Amino acid sequence: REVVSEALNAILSETDRMKEMITQMLDLAKSSGSQAFEFAQVDLTQLLSGAVKPLRQAYGREIIMEEDGPAIVETDGKFVKQLLFILLDNALKYSEREVFASIQDQQDVVEITVKDYGKGIPQSALPHIFDRFYRVESDRSRKTGGTGLGLSIAKEIADGLGATLTIESVVDMGTVIRVLIPKNRKVLSEF
């Protein structure tokens, strides 16, 4: 009974997340600027924790979180959470081992890092990784059901938030994605 209840809660949570993702994708499609974003003070540590918990349950895999406490920034929490879901979901899909997610509070920005020890991405593919419908190789999409939209949407969200999204990868060693989110919207012009 307890396992059934937990599974139903995970399904309901995932359904809500998918509904929210569709709404956000429609907002992104309608908006060419930041008017779809609602900026407020949010704690990125809480958002990351909120993204990690259902993915741990869904995948039955370890996601190791490293953080030093609250990391307050002025951003849109709903879109940041969606961005985190995309990055963590990709890391879990394309690796077999544990995934690391960390938050580092720096001077004017907070850095979120998602690291996996998966197959990695060839250097020749990295310039195209944020392009819509781009997939590194066809068998990756068959195994995971990917559409080639996840990282493109992540990039659009990051751009709308005024965040910087970078990716480093080494074949057969893994991938590291970093998101630098300004603490204050006034800092946006510096990035």
Image (cartoon, grey):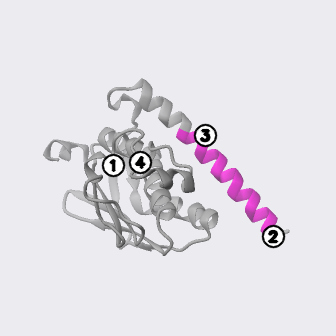
> What is the residue that sits farthest to the right in this orientation?
1
Distance Cα–Cα, label 3 vs label 4 = 24 Å
Do the residues under discs 2 and 4 have CB atoms within 8 angstroms? no
Question: Which residues lie in the magenta part?
Answer: 2-21
The residue identified by callout 4 is 135
The residue identified by callout 3 is 19
Q: Report the front residue among 131 and 179.
A: 131
Which type of secondary structure does the marked residue at label 2 adopt?
helix
Which kind of residue does numbered mark 2 sit on? Glu
Which type of secondary structure does the marked residue at label 4 adopt?
loop
Which kind of residue does numbered mark 3 sit on? Lys
Q: Nearer the viewer, mark 1 or mark 4?
A: 4
Q: Nearer the viewer, mark 2 or mark 1?
A: 1
Q: Residues within 10 Å of mark 4 (few under 14, many from 20)?
A: some
The residue identified by callout 1 is 129
Q: Please report the residue visible at 46 percent of the width from the left and 52 percent of the height from the top.
A: 86
**Disc with the residue nearer the chain's start (3 vs 1):** 3
**Disc with the residue nearer the chain's start (3 vs 4):** 3
The x and y percentages for residue 182 are 25, 51
Q: Please report the residue visible at 64 percent of the width from the left and 51 percent of the height from the top.
A: 14
The x and y percentages for residue 117 are 40, 72
Vertically, is 159 above or below 143?
A: above
Distance Cα–Cα, label 3 vs label 1 = 25 Å
Distance Cα–Cα, label 2 vs label 4 = 39 Å
Do the residues under discs 2 and 1 have CB atoms within 8 angstroms? no
Distance Cα–Cα, label 2 vs label 3 = 26 Å
The residue identified by callout 2 is 2
Distance Cα–Cα, label 1 vs label 4 = 7 Å
Q: Please report the residue visible at 65 percent of the width from the left and 52 percent of the height from the top.
A: 13
